[in-house]
Image: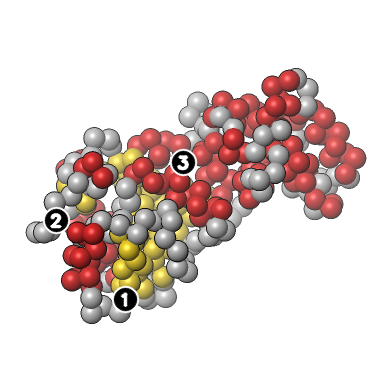
Amino acid sequence: MDNKIPDKIKDQHIIVDKSVISKIANAASLTEHDSVLEIGSGPGNLTKAIAAHAGLVYAIEKDPGYIMELKKIFGGNRKVMVIEGNALDVKLPQFNKIVSNPPYKILQPFFLRLLHERKYNFECCVTVAPHGFSKLALAKPGSLDFGVMSAFFYAFYNVEVIAELKKNAFKPEPRVTSSILRISPKPNQSPLSLMLKLMFLEDSRKIGNAMLDALWNNGESILQNKVTKAEARRIMDKFENGEQKNQILEKRVLQLSNEEMVSLVKSILANISNV
């Protein structure tokens, strides 16, 4: 029995179902060569399962009560390193996999942190996520749910649902439904996903400039049929018809609304061949 009572207000929903814990750990295909990042370790229920298979676990936790519990449980275990602090601002160690049941509200900002710090190329991430996050991460171009975060996941990752979870798998029970997601790098990318990826990697630049670079890039175009810079410029001219489109191209990708992202993707699909 955990000594500390989870605080629902702090977004703490501890997994107490042992079969779910095993399913999460198994989905990551852990080996002794893996260094695993766990966000929001809580009382260590999932940490134990990860440490049983991985070579090293970095357990990030900000709650003082849970930090004390983790140190008691894993104090003599050299495979588990407890990192005290918020996963959004503590210094991140080197890792190749993420296995986690994090506070739901930090999922989106954490992935954006990985993007900004160029730590997005992990081998695998298995995470528990709320329905709203899963819906965004799984949305495909052209669907009603597609938005800015959908574009991010479409550009970088393959996302699959491993299992839907019952609320009674947690203590306390969350108000929303939850899933186990497996997120892995996308090996084969279309011109659309490559263009979106470049926009996110160069998110300090205007979208129009990033798109032009993607189309030409000194002859290394994302298109199957390579184009000259002049041809790339002519393709870009197709995007610049209309005041709304011009406004979108003047923005940075993370400044877009979901509606503007949908409009941008439609334009890319309509104006670029071989996408």
Residue at image coords 57%, 58%: 118
**How far apart are the two marked residues, 3 and 1, measured between alpha carbons?**
31 Å
Task: Confirm whether residue 27 shows in the render.
Answer: no
Residue 254 image-quadrant placement: top right
Label drawn at residue 137: 3
Residue at image coords 34%, 44%: 104
The correct choice, above or below, for 124 with respect to 239 in the image is: below
Residue at image coords 19%, 46%: 7
- How many discs mark residues in the rendered view? 3
Task: Confirm whether residue 273 shows in the render.
Answer: yes
Q: Which residue is identified by label 1?
A: 79
Coordinates of residue 20 in the picture (x, y in percent): 24, 53
Q: Earlier in the sequence, mark 3 or mark 1?
A: 1
Q: Amino acid at mark 3?
A: Ala
- Quarter of the image that includes the N terminus: bottom left
Mark 1 surroundings: few (<14), some (14-19) or many (≥20) residues within 10 A: some
- Quarter of the image that includes the C terminus: top right
